[in-house]
Amino acid sequence: MIPRTLAATLHRLCQSFPVIAITGPRQSGKTTLARAVFANKAYVSLEDPIERAFAMDDPRGFLARFAKGAVFDEAQRWPDLFSHLQGMVDAERTPGRFVLTGSQQFGLLAGVTQSLAGRVGLTRLLPLASAEMPATSRQLSVDAMLLLGGYPLLHTRPSMATDWFSSYVATDIERDVRQVLNVQDMGTFQRFLRLCAGRSGQLLNLSALAGEAGISHSTARAWLSVLESSDLVFLLPPYHRNFGKRLVKMPKLYFLDSGLACWLLGIRSPEVLALHPSRGALFETWVVGEFVKGRFNLGLPADLYFWRDNNGLEADLVFEVGTHIQPVEIKSGQTLTRDYLHAGQASGRFAGSEALPPWLIYGGSDSYERSGVRVIGWRDLALADGSPTQPLQ
């Protein structure tokens, strides 16, 4: 098993909450992690039709086997589970008693919110962050890393990446969409998915996206909601304080795995990616994903933003550190140029004295301070503790 940073968060939460929930996209390693961290607990998959039929036909008999606790995999497949667990944990509030996993957040979070509010520690497991990857993967070039992405299986069998992504889209993603929205025209949905990949790192204009996909605005919104709830895409909101400026109000769209975005764009080799017009946006996608993973691995909300005003002043990423604001500029080039430094210096000007010294994350290897900018090579974004506020020196 590849060690996961979220394991420490699970150990912490199970000291306080009677129920722990692990959500995230399919194939991100939820089941493997839950069974490793909670190896002393009984395990049952509610994807198993026999177990699910038992639960639905005789819920009391089914749960009587797990009075001391259990790991319920794909818990949203039996919606009544949440109300039954409410009664069990209220009668005996033993910390860390039950563990729920689910790859589709609509079902899992709806049940948790309705029945287990205040009783559950919520976590989200995304594909591997760079700090979690095996040593061999961390030696890859930047283009090879972007192409491979972070799904755990691909870091033990990287040669199967192209076939794996093809199967992943055709089965796992489409299954979630069918379960939630009953989509019949999967060809149109796949076109929509590829159009989203082409917009990763860009402002989200939902009307334009819907028009190009040939679907209604409401359909595009519903499909995008499923991708977001399944932790396949992430909407980065604009920073909420205006500092007296007129702001862009649309969020930016990002895929949470650069490898999946590359595959959807038809990029199959590092050589093709190196010359692809979307390379800069895909590098930015990878960097933003690293920050999101770092926050989620600590059990924290993302609390990440971007800044852009109508005068063109912008910061690719913004987050709060105490009463201050940390601006981050992202550049994919491997050579640090004067233009990159100027962009880094400009990224925090919107916040004036509230801005901390800016960070510039780029596609090169060296990290140092220069001209008031903290320059961070992409390899040094591997985070020591999973926190996006302290990259390694």
Image: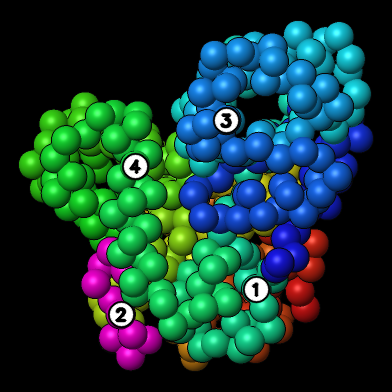
Q: Nearer the viewer, residue 258 or 306?
A: 258
Which of the two discs, 4 and 2, labels the residue nearer the N terminus?
4
Q: Which of the labelled discs sits on residue 51, or is there none?
A: 3
| Sequence order check, earlier mark of 4 and 3 | 3
For badge 1, the amino acid type reads Met
Residue at image position (34%, 32%) is: 179
Query: Residue 351: in sight, yes or no?
Result: no
Residue 210: mark in rendering = none
Residue 268 disc label: 2
Circle nearer the N terminus (2, 1): 1
Q: Closer to the observer: label 4 or label 3?
A: 3
- 116 relative to 334, above or below: above
Asked where in the image residue 18 lies, by quadrant, the reply is: top right
Q: Secondary structure at mark 3?
A: helix
Distance, label 3 to label 1, CA atoms, is: 34 Å
Above or below residue 57? Residue 221 is below
Q: Amino acid at mark 3?
A: Glu
SS state under label 2: loop
Q: Which residues are magenta?
A: 263-272
Q: Residues within 10 Å of mark 4 (few under 14, many from 20)?
A: some
Contact flag, marks 4 and 2 (Cβ < 8 Å): no
Image quarter of the C terminus: bottom right
Q: Left or right: where does residue 134 sit relative to residue 163?
A: right
Real-space Cα distance between discs 4 and 2? 24 Å
- Give the crowd class for mark 1: few <14, some 14-19, many >=20 residues within 10 Å: many
Identify the mark at residue 133; answer none if there is no mark.
1
